[in-house]
Amino acid sequence: MTQRTLVVTGGHGSLGAAVVEAALARGLNIAVIDHGTGVAPKGVLEIGGVDLTDAGAAEAAIGKVVEAFGGVDALLNIAGGFVWQTTDDEKPAWDRMFALNLTTALNASRAALPHLKASADGRIVNVGANGALKAAAGMGAYGASKSAVHRLTEALAEELKDTSVTVNAVLPSILDTEQNRKDMPDADPSKWVQPSDLAEVMLFLASPASRAVTGALIPVVGKV
């Protein structure tokens, strides 16, 4: 069996790093595409300084992956952002949230699609949000942008039903990250989702074994 190639956007964040670590343990080819630059683990193709809100930049980055590995089998759209703000905030973040959460996933998916269709088992795995199912106070901009990711997932899945490509999304609650612990010091992080656990769900969806699942929005909420 040919070694599969995974593309991970936002690969330097807590979740991205967990996905990369788990994918390496599976012996997969891995490319990390990130706006920032970092030191990727040995054997990982690092493509830094990429603005995925720019369609041309996304296409160029995917082109580098294809040049290095010969194709793309799975795209894991992890790049994104979060802001808590009420609707009357002086500097509305709605455009920024849609750019970071929706546009990055859309551009990366469009760039990867020709190569995913050429794979025997092409996969797109998006990161939505459980908090987008019903937005709480201060979650309007973020929740709306992640809800748009849910709709992108469903639409793409329908559009690609006659191909080898499946499209699914995970909907995490709160990830147990250093930043979340700082932001919520009185919370109980034992109830949150470990990035490594979410990574396992995402890698299943990125594998050939998930071929019967498409268009799914899968809650991964821990004990929250």
Image: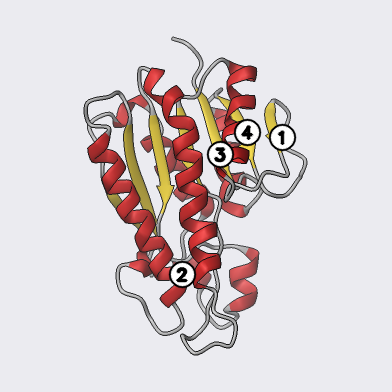
Nearer the observer, disc 1 or disc 3? 3
Snapshot quadrant of residue 73: top left
- In the visual, does 40 lie left or right of 52? right
- Residue that badge 3 annotates: 8
Residue 12, position as x, y percentages in the image: 66, 48
Q: Which mark is residue 142?
A: 2
Name the image quarter holding the N terminus.
top left
Closest to the observer: 193 or 91?
A: 91
Nearer the observer, disc 1 or disc 4? 4
Alpha-carbon span between mark 1 and mark 2: 31 Å
Is there any visible trace of residue 214 in the rendered image? no
Instruction: Indicate the amino acid at tag 2.
Output: Tyr
Closest to the observer: 197 or 72?
A: 72
Snapshot quadrant of residue 89: bottom right
Judge the density around disc 2: few (<14), some (14-19), many (≥20) Cα neighbours within 10 Å: many
Of the residues under marks 1 and 3, which one precedes in the sequence?
3
Alpha-carbon span between mark 1 and mark 4: 18 Å
